[in-house]
Amino acid sequence: MERSFVIIKPDAVQRGKVGEIITRFERKGFKIVGLKFLRITRQQAEEQYSCHKGKSFFESLVDFMISGPAVVMVVEARDAIVLTRRLMGATDPLKAEPGTVRGDYSVDIKHNLIHGSDCPESFAHEYPIYFSDVELVSYDFAIDNWLYYG
């Protein structure tokens, strides 16, 4: 099993899409192992997006991420990172496929509703900004035998 880190961004919270987005993860078969509703701090946002520090959009991205409450979660599934990226859709809503979160709800590249880890290294960097290891809950999923072969 693999884990991925997800942020349901302030625009999604303001638009009332939190339940819909979480439902998509659950319907796909993801196990939620960590979940928080919070207001991201400037320090957390700057650490989260430190790879973009010095780029022209860094400050506006940080300002956007701290502009309102958000939901952070850690999800688990086989190939969780790739599946999360597919469920979210392309960052640019003009390229996001219908049926994805961004393809169905996003109309602006800045207000694209959701963030997800893009590789295992990103996950390792991102989740500790918001969760301690003891806050992540490991458990058996009753439907695992119906989701995975072998």
Image (spheres, rainbow, N blue to C red):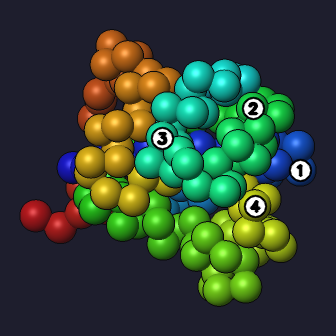
Q: Residue at label 2? A: 66
Residue closest to the eye, 39 or 83: 39
Marks 3 and 1, the one that precedes in the sequence: 1
The amino acid beneath tag 1 is Arg
Q: Residue at label 1? A: 15
Residue at the extreme right? 15
How much space separates mark 3 and mark 4, taking CA atoms?
A: 17 Å
Which x, y percent locates residue 67? 82, 34
Residue 56 is left or right of residue 15, and the answer is: left
Residue at x 67% of width, y 67% of height? 101
Mark number, residue 50: 3
Mark number, residue 110: 4
Res 65 → quadrant: top right
Residue at the extreme top? 134
Which x, y percent locates residue 75? 42, 44
| Nearest-to-viewer mark from 3 and 1 | 3
